[in-house]
Structures are given as structure tokens and as C-alpha cells.
Image (tube, helix red, strand yellow):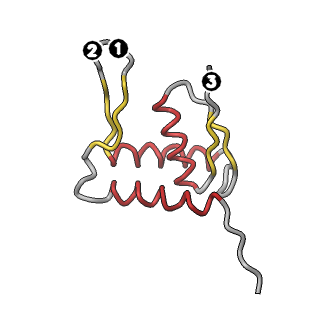
Amino acid sequence: MSARRVTVADGLGSLAAELRRRADTDGADEIALRFSDGGGAGATSAWSWADAWEQARRVAAALREDGIRAGDRLLVVAPDVRAAVAAHFGAWALGAVPIHLGLP
């Protein structure tokens, strides 16, 4: 009997499942993430769990349409933090493995 090879992608499904679970509960409208808007006076905006899951679903659908599949590695180069987070969540929802490339 051969053991199944465990990959990084195996653990990512649990992150997406947790995001979806939180989006499907009574707490779906609770704040999941808060972003600095870069303006003065500490201006921020936020995503609820439902917002975060919707972003993940949209990105996952776009990635799937572009031919990305579960287990594929995805290089993430994003113009801002929101886009990077959405890309990571979408990749996890699809079962792909996001690899973040930080720009100077």
C-alpha cells in the first residue's frame, strides 16, 4: 500500500472552508479584515466575513476561467493589499497555492 503524498494544497482547503463557514453563520456581517486606507487620521475600511467570501468566490471563478486548477501554484503580484488578500483567498477557495511576490 502506497501512502498518498501530502502537499501544501491539502492544507489550503481548510482555510477556504473556514472562510466559507464564517460567511455562512449569523456572524457573517462581523468584521473579518480591516484595511488602512493610506490616508491621514487612521482612515480604514473593512470586509465582513461575507464580503471576504464573496471576494474569494469571484477571484476563484476568474482563476478557474483562466485555466488555474486545484494544486496549481499561482504567483500573486497585486497593486494593493486588498487585491493581494482577494487573490490569496480566491486561490485557496480553488485549491491553488498562492505565492506572493512583494514589490519594493
Q: Which mark is residue 41?
A: 2
Quadrant housing the N terminus: bottom right
* Label 1 SS: loop
Q: Earlier in the sequence, mark 3 or mark 1?
A: 1
- 38 is higher (above) or lower (below) than 19: above
Q: Residue at the bottom extreme?
A: 1
Could you classify mark 2 by the number of other residues whose Cα lies within 10 Å: few (under 14), some (14-19), or many (20 or more)? few
Q: Residue at x 62, y 37 (%)?
A: 100
Q: Residue at x 28, y 42 (%)?
A: 31
Q: Residue at x 47, y 49 (%)?
A: 57
- 46 is higher (above) or lower (below) than 21: above
- 41 is higher (above) or lower (below) than 7: above
Which of the pair 8/69 is nearer the observer? 8
- CB atoms of marks 2 and 1 within 8 Å: yes
* Label 2 SS: loop
Q: CA distance from mark 3 to mark 1?
A: 21 Å
Amino acid at circle 2 = Ala
Q: CA distance from mark 2 to mark 1?
A: 7 Å
Q: Which mark is residue 103?
A: 3
Q: Earlier in the sequence, mark 3 or mark 2?
A: 2
Mark 1, residue position: 39
In the picture, measured across the screen, residue 7 lies left or right of residue 35, that is right
Amino acid at circle 3 = Leu
- CB atoms of marks 3 and 2 within 8 Å: no
Could you classify mark 3 by the number of other residues whose Cα lies within 10 Å: few (under 14), some (14-19), or many (20 or more)? few
Amino acid at circle 1 = Gly
User: Which image quadrant for residue 18?
Assistant: bottom left
Q: CA distance from mark 3 to mark 2?
A: 26 Å
Q: Position of residue 98 (x, y in %)?
A: 61, 45
Q: Position of residue 44 (x, y in %)?
A: 31, 25
